[in-house]
Structures are given as C-alpha cells and as structure tokens.
Amino acid sequence: MPTYEYQCRSCDHEFELFQQMSDPVKRKCPACNQLQLERLIGTGAGVLFKGSGFYETDYRSSSYKKAAQAEKSAAAGTNGTSDKKKKSSEKATSNGQKKTKAKAGSAA
C-alpha cells in the first residue's frame, strides 16, 4: 500500500496518508473540515531489485563508475612505480655483485 501526500488549499495543512490504491481520494481536510483537500503528485520511491542476479553495483551512476575507475588506475599506477623501483635496485645490486666477482676473479 502506498503513502499519499495531501495538502489543503484552504489552510495549507499538509499530511501523509497510508491508503490502498483502490481507496477514494480524500476531499475533507482533517484540520479545517473544508472540502479543499487535494492529493499531491509525489516523485515516487526508488526501485530496488532484490534476489539472485541483481547486484547493488549494477545501476551505479556514470560519475561513480568514472571515479571508481580512476581510483583503480591510480592504485595500479602507484604499485607499478614501486615495483619498477624495486626491479631497478635489484638490477643495480646484481650488477654490483657481478663487478665485484669480476674484480676478484681478475686479481686471483
């Protein structure tokens, strides 16, 4: 059963009424007892699909998706930079070890 919003044109009294869709529209204001009550058109509620096969992230806005993608790529870029630094320092260490061995071999 939906909740309807009503407003009186006479006294501007506003209220919500929980009623069936088949119930007649109310006309008499509970505050001033005038027949000036009208049902307002609401924006409705958001639709939420529940059950298997529906995921919360399926219907995200495009701005959310862009921000998530940017965050993901920024995180991947940070990890890639630290990996490159590690690899270059490992190469320098291994090159340094080879040079040391070469020097030791030439002296012997």
Image (cartoon, grey):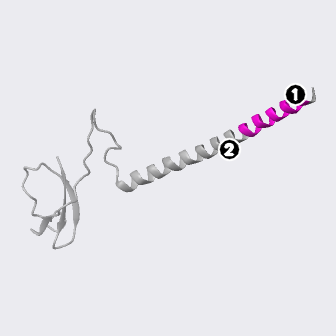
Report the amino acid beneath label 2: Lys
SS under mark 2:
helix
| The quadrant where residue 11 appears | bottom left
Depth check: 56 or 22 in front? 56
Q: What mark, if any, has residue 12 been given in the picture? A: none
Task: Tell whether position 105 is magenta.
Answer: yes
**What main secondary structure does the magenta stretch of the protein show?**
helix
Which residue is at 50% across, 48% downward?
A: 73
In-image side of 16 versus 75 (left or right): left
Cβ atoms under marks 2 and 1 closer than 8 Å: no
Q: Which residues are magenta?
A: 90-106
Decide whether residue 20 is among the magenta residues.
Answer: no
* Vertical placement of residue 50 versus 33, above or below: above
Residue tagged 2: 85
Q: Amino acid at mark 1?
A: Gly
Label 1, on which residue? 105
From the viewer's perspective, is 75 left or right of 25? right
**Label 1 packing within 10 angstroms: few (<14), some (14-19), many (20+):** few
